[in-house]
Image: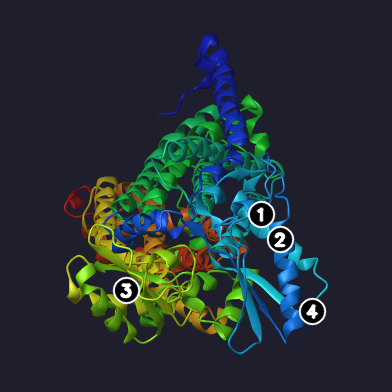
């Protein structure tokens, strides 16, 4: 029943603009507070892989034991120099070392030099220039005390500042030699530089892309900015909540989670706005008052938008079941972001759209919807009988539903056949970048001239009585170049064997065996060697532990595989329950879930083709398929929710076939726009030079487009029309046909 605004009391008419102003003012306050917090998120990030492993992981237990053997931990920085031809070049490198240790640290309030924060300090032991056996390279270890490396200095950490200054000192050397900083110190600095773009370029690119699409969709100079403002203010609200949780150590936030959260908020807010605005525009054609039109649009949009938000929130919260803290942190961070998007889209955006009062139609200028009494925009008009693309497509699907969905399913199955070619065994740390960084170049030189694993070896802890057996067994493992026991002199930095017949360090009856790998400890191959070492030494004793940075990578890979087996079926069950509650049916929700599983397979298959033969990626992080599933199933089902909630509404009046046809015709444009917006916002992740984010961008981007143009447009409406009223079983008796 329509509300006649002329009958409203003067008091109510006065309260409306006041309520709108209060809502807008409240959100502006949130935006102001969130804007101040925006730059602080990087202060609560943790990007070290070891910080995300569960306490039950073998490498985590080994790290705890290692701290008792070598209490003074350090972040290894390896400066490697290539192109060395003789003693003159080695002397140049030595001069460089002296300049480095004497360099004052920028913005350090304590007035320290780089030499003061090395481990051990340069005053106790000057870093040594170590030539390679082939005489063509040299390296210097600039390891920084791990605790000092985390100190805040200027706008960064001390470790990052030291890494940048070491590179600056080398750049000032008058030499043609090739020098690069790698190791944990160099890689950490390069990762920090890559993540720095999340606070700036990522958000700018995403917002610009969304703005361009909205300008095309709305053809209005006003409305796109209202939608975009809603997205940005929703993001500030999410930032406030996420920062508070990370600062209180409730979640462990990393740069990747932060970037994905940004994209989720912008994309979801825009999608919800597109649906609400489309329904609002429909109602403006039917009623004279913008307030009445918004009231009707808000009520009819609430259920599908709420179901969409709840589906994504619950899907993300399932990530709390992950043993990896990086994944489990993304769950609540993303869920908070979606909640902020949902609330902003249904409170702030309506207030902005109605701020003009009776002239609120002006936000659509120049294509303002006009109310014409008795026009063809009446409620009973059939939108599928129009001349546009979506009305024509809806009639085509309705005419041949079985052929339509069989062809669509066949195409998706064909792409799914490439799923086995998706390489998800993991990436080495030097393979995580999409561009060639200084640390990557350094790793290449290091592996070409040295035992690359010497800087971060595999660490094996065994009972004292099994020490000799462990050393002997480990030496036989392929890829191990050197094995020795940790002795007091080695723990202090001396080469192994310098002190003859030295007894090993013993802690609670355990000793440490150090195993040097042929390849860099940050490579994927080193993780495979760790797996072989564990198979070799575990039979010696139940107390044996194998750790080190390569072991952490292996444990991360194995933990992700375990998470996948737990999380995937849980998400499917959660989504199915939400769909059953929304559609009051069982058959249609099952169809939607199966369609989205098929869509996910097609997205992974197409991504594998792109990764292997177009982009030439060396592999993929094991969590890419898992997170891709979470985002695609949770987000992709949104478009089916938008379609099928309208289809059910229409089916109650016109029957299943006609209702589905009408729903496809009327929602086609807005859902397609929403899908393009979401795919484009995820594509913005590609501006960050990390393979993980680039691959998430591709997987989610192509998956959303498949959901938009194939699953929602052809497969789901085809199957529902083919099944007919039984799609709504067991409550199908309410539908006439």
The residue that disc 1 covers is 114
* 4 vs 3, front mark: 4
Q: Are marks 4 and 3 in contact (CB under 8 Å)?
A: no
- Looking at the rendering, which quadrant does residue 636 occupy? bottom left
Name the residue: 50% across, 57% down.
Answer: 74
The residue that disc 3 covers is 402
Q: Alpha-carbon neighbours of circle 1 within 10 Å: few (<14), some, or many (≥20)?
A: many
Residue 588 seen in the current view? no
Q: Element type at marker 4? A: loop
* 4 vs 2, front mark: 2
Where is 566 relative to 156, above or below?
below
Asked if residue 694 lies left or right of residue 220, the reply is left
Residue 271 seen in the current view? yes
Furthest residue to the right? 174
Alpha carbon separation for disc pair 1 and 3? 71 Å
Mark nearer the N terminus (4 vs 1): 1
Mark nearer the N terminus (3 vs 2): 2
Asked if residue 212 lies left or right of residue 572, the reply is right
Of residues 347 and 33, the one drawn nearer to the viewer in this rendering:
33
Alpha carbon separation for disc pair 4 and 3? 69 Å
Res 176 label: 4
Q: Are marks 1 and 2 in contact (CB under 8 Å)?
A: yes
Q: Alpha-carbon neighbours of circle 4 within 10 Å: few (<14), some, or many (≥20)?
A: few
Q: Alpha-carbon neighbours of circle 3 within 10 Å: few (<14), some, or many (≥20)?
A: some
């Amino acid at each position: 029943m329509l509300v006649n605004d002329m009958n409203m009391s003067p008091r109510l008419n006065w309260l409306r603009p006041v309520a709108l102003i209060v809502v807008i003012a409240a959100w502006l306050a949130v935006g102001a507070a969130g804007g101040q917090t925006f730059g602080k998120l990087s202060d609560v990030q943790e990007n070290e892989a070891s910080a995300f492993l569960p306490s039950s992981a073998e490498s985590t237990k080994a790290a705890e034991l290692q701290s008792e053997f070598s209490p003074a931990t350090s972040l290894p920085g390896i400066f490697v120099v290539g192109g060395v031809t003789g003693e003159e070049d080695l002397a140049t490198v030595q001069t460089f070392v002296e300049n480095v240790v004497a360099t004052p640290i920028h913005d350090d309030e304590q007035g320290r030099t780089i030499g003061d924060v090395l481990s051990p300090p340069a005053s106790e032991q000057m870093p040594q220039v170590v030539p390679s056996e082939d005489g063509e390279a040299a390296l210097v270890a600039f390891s920084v005390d791990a605790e000092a490396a985390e100190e805040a200095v200027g706008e960064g950490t001390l470790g990052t500042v030291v890494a940048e200054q070491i590179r600056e000192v080398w750049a000032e050397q008058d030499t043609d030699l090739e020098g690069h900083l790698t190791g944990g110190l160099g890689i950490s600095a390069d990762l920090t530089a890559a993540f720095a773009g999340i606070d700036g370029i990522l958000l700018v690119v995403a917002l610009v892309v969304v703005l361009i699409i909205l300008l095309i969709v709305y053809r209005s100079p006003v409305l796109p900015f209202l939608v975009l403002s809603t997205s940005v203010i929703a993001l500030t609200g999410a930032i406030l909540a996420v920062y508070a949780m990370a600062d209180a150590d409730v979640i462990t936030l990393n740069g990747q989670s932060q970037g994905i959260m940004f994209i989720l908020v912008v994309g979801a807010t825009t999608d919800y706005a597109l649906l609400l605005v489309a329904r609002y525009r429909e109602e403006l054609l039917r009623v004279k008052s913008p307030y009445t039109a918004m009231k009707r649009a808000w009520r009819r949009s609430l259920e599908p938008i709420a179901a969409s938000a709840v589906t994504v929130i619950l899907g993300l919260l399932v990530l709390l079941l992950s043993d990896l803290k990086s994944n489990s942190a993304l769950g609540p961070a993303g869920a908070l972001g979606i909640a902020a998007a949902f609330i902003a889209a249904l409170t702030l955006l309506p207030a902005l759209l109605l701020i003009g009062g009776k002239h609120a139609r002006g936000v659509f200028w120049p294509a303002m919807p006009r109310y014409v009494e008795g026009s063809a925009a009446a409620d009973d008009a059939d939108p599928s009988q129009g001349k546009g693309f979506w009305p024509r497509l809806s009639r085509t699907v309705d005419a041949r539903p079985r052929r339509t969905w069989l062809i669509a399913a066949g195409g998706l199955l064909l792409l799914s056949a490439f799923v086995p070619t998706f390489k998800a065994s993991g990436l080495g740390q030097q393979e995580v970048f999409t561009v060639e960084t200084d640390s990557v170049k350094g790793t290449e030189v290091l592996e070409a001239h040295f035992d690359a694993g010497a800087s971060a070896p595999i660490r094996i802890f065994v009972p004292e009585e099994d020490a000799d057996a462990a050393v002997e067994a480990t030496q036989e493992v392929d890829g191990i170049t050197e094995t020795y026991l940790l002795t007091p002199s080695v723990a202090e930095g001396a080469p192994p064997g310098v002190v003859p017949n030295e007894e090993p360090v013993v802690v609670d009856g355990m000793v440490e065996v150090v195993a040097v790998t042929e390849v860099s400890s940050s490579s994927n191959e080193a993780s495979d060697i760790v797996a072989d070492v564990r198979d070799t030494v575990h039979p010696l004793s139940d107390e044996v532990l194998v750790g080190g940075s390569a072991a952490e990578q292996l444990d991360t890979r194995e933990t992700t595989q375990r998470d996948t087996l737990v999380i995937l079926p849980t998400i499917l069950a959660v989504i199915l329950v939400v769909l059953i509650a929304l559609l009051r049916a069982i058959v249609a929700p099952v169809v939607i879930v199966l369609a989205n599983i098929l869509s996910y397979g097609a997205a992974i298959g197409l991504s594998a083709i792109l990764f292997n033969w177009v982009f030439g990626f060396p592999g993929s992080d094991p969590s890419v398929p898992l997170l891709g599933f979470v985002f695609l199933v949770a987000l992709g089902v949104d478009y089916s929710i938008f379609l099928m909630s309208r289809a059910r509404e229409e089916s109650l009046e016109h029957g299943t076939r006609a209702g589905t046809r009408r729903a496809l015709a009327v929602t086609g444009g807005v859902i397609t726009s929403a899908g393009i917006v979401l795919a484009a916002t995820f594509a913005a992740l590609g501006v960050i030079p990390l393979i993980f984010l680039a691959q998430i961008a591709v997987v989610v981007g192509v998956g959303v487009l498949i959901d938009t143009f194939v699953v929602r447009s052809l497969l789901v409406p085809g199957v529902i029309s083919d099944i007919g009223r039984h799609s709504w079983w067991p409550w199908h008796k309410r539908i006439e046909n």
